[in-house]
Amino acid sequence: MDGVPTMTTNLDTDLITIAEAARRLRVSALTIKRWIAQGRLLAYRVGPRQIRIRSEDLPMIVSLVTPSPRILAADKEQRDIWAGYDPEKVKDALRKSAGALAGVDRHALFQDIHAARRQASRGRPA
């Protein structure tokens, strides 16, 4: 066909649309098109405008997610919440901070805290 490479497939194969592939994989049609353009997913042209995907090719795009060793190490460090705990340092910090809020208007402080929480919960100023 005029130098255009063609691929043949068995017509008994279940050919599905881009929309159907997107629905099955629970991604957008644009993602399916991007994967086709990147060569990550095989697709076949049916006629001048229609593109189809073999349903048996969909598992090619799905892979098991395994965390990297760095993430596993960070996760392990987070599990030990008492690692590096020094009760003497805590006592010293409490002694140094004693009276830090002396003279602060308690009511105004609580209002500021609540206003900050409302802002953070909506992602914008109150």
Image: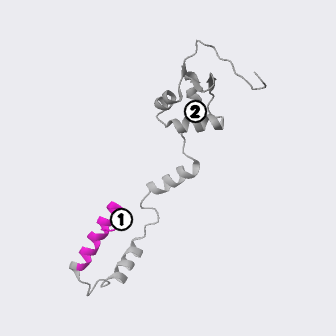
- Left or right: where 99 falls relative to 87: left
Q: Position of residue 3 (x, y in %)?
A: 78, 25
Q: Quadrant of the N terminus?
A: top right
Q: Which residue is mark 1?
A: 124
Establish if 86 lies above or below 99.
above
Using the image as rendered, state which of residue 33 and residue 84 is in the foreground: 33
Instruction: Residue lying at the far left in this picture: please name it.
Output: 107
Instruction: Residue lying at the far top in this picture: please name it.
Output: 12
Q: Secondary structure at mark 2?
A: helix
Residue 10 covered by magenta stretch: no
Q: Quadrant of the C terminus?
A: bottom left
Residues at marks 1 and 2, CA–CA distance in whole angstroms: 39 Å
- Left or right: where 32 falls relative to 112: right
Q: Position of residue 117 (x, y in %)?
A: 30, 66
Q: Position of residue 33 (x, y in %)?
A: 58, 35
Q: Which residue is mark 2?
A: 61
Using the image as rendered, state which of residue 46 and residue 87 is in the foreground: 46
Q: Indicate the amino acid at tag 1.
A: Arg
Using the image as rendered, state which of residue 108 and residue 1 is in the foreground: 1
In the image, the segment drawn in magenta is: 108-126
